[in-house]
Amino acid sequence: MNSMINGKSIIIFGPPGAGKGTQSGLISTMTGKPQVSTGDMLRDAVADDSDVGREAKSYMDKGLLVPDEIILQLIKIRLSRDDAKSGLLFDGFPRTIPQAIALETLTDVSMVISLVVEDDEIVSRITGRRTDPETGEIYHLEYKPAPQHIRDRLLQRDDDTEDTVRNRLSTFHKQTAPLSDFYRDKGILFEVNGSGEIKQVSSSIEAIIEAKTGD
Ligand code: AMP
């Protein structure tokens, strides 16, 4: 891996349900960077019933963003771990301009892979999304059915209902979408059509990372 990627972080960016979590596995394998999902960290805090978890849940349930201070505190702790030295793969972070500005003081970002998907498709994708609590694997009732023997144990996220999804999309357009311009201006935004088959999207991402590695 060359200096364009080595030691630097990568961001997978896009609206909720664009496939960020699904594609993170591939990027993590290709680059060796551990995936860090702020959504997963918050859900863990909620499951632990910690102070942070209780506060975060009140925002998450409404489809609103958790305050920047809470998120940045979690990110700083995560970046202080040994395996963060070669950079991290951020999934679902940053989600506001202040988060992106704060991140600049914490780690170098080499590329932002942006998955572009229309709102209507997002709603159908998210409402059919199910997670396997044992492996963390994400499935979809229609697009990525789980093996028969584990179907009974799959869970739907509390915030994956249609009303909350619509709020999360409006939050995305207001607060998070402006980050595209922020990173485009820096010349590190790589847009991918996220509406195709999972494998098709993966090949596009693979091509981008390979091209960048060859810089
Ligand atoms: P996700 O799993 O990335 O869709 O995140 C689920 C929810 O967690 C979001 O709808 C927000 O309420 C909250 N959340 C996750 N990451 C962030 C972030 N970087 N900034 C603010 N809120 C976040």
Image (spheres, helix red, strand yellow):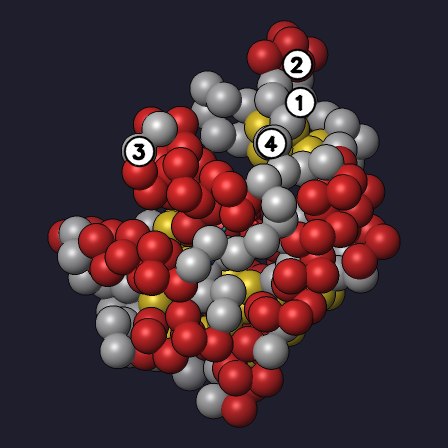
Residue 89, x across and y down, in percent: 39, 58
Q: Nearer the viewer, residue 13 or 204?
A: 13
Locate residue 170: give its quadrant: bottom right
For residue 101, side relative to residue 22 (left or right): left
- Identify the residue under disc 2: 151
For residue 39, side relative to residue 23 (left or right): left
Q: Crowding at label 3, few (<14), some or many (≥20) Cα neighbours within 10 Å?
A: few
Residue 194 appears in the picture as rendered: no
Q: Is mark 4 within 8 Å of ligand 1?
A: yes
Vertical order, 96 against 58 (above or below): below
Helix, strand or loop at disc 4?
A: loop
User: In front: mark 2 or mark 3?
Assistant: 3
Question: Residue at 60% of width from left, 31% of height from top?
Answer: 157
- Identify the residue under disc 3: 50
Q: Nearer the viewer, residue 201 or 158?
A: 158
Vertical order, 170 against 111 (above or below): above
